[in-house]
Amino acid sequence: MSGRTRTRACPERTCVGCRERAVKSELLRTVAVEGDCTPDPRGTLPGRGAYVHPAPVCVDQAVRRKAFPRALRVPGPLDVKALRRYVEQAQGCRQQL
């Protein structure tokens, strides 16, 4: 045998909030759309993306550090209301299970 493993490599990304590396499927992709930081759970929206854990703590850290405008390369602040709403709803669904 050649020594190669048959398992596929999982792409990793860094959370802009806590700066920890995680598997891409565990993180939520966000994009800048007209001055808003929009969640992109399917990963299909066009443009540059930034990844964050779908947890309010990581979103708050990213906002405090002004990481979203820097990661998305957008001048000025971004509105994160839609992102916060999405994360809170996702967190509520997980707690019910």
Image: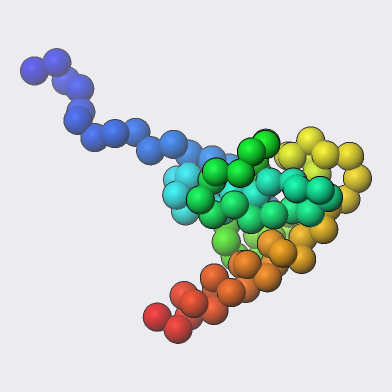
Please tell me which residue is depicted at 64% across the width and 38% down the height of the picture: 46
Q: Please, is residue 93 above or below residue 23 in the view? A: below
Please tell me which residue is depicted at 64% across the width and 56% down the height of the picture: 39
Q: In the shown orientation, is residue 3 left or right of residue 86?
A: left
What x and y, as percent, mark residue 42?
51, 51
Count of labels in the image: 0
What x and y, as percent, mark residue 13?
54, 40
Q: Quadrant of the N terminus?
A: top left
Q: Is residue 68 visible?
A: no
What x and y, as percent, mark residue 77?
88, 50
Q: Based on the displayed image, in which of its 4 quarters is residue 54 positioned?
A: bottom right
What x and y, as percent, mark residue 63?
78, 57
Q: Please, is residue 94 above or below residue 45 in the view? A: below
- Farthest bottom residue? 96
- Farthest right residue? 76
- Foreground: 94 or 85? 85
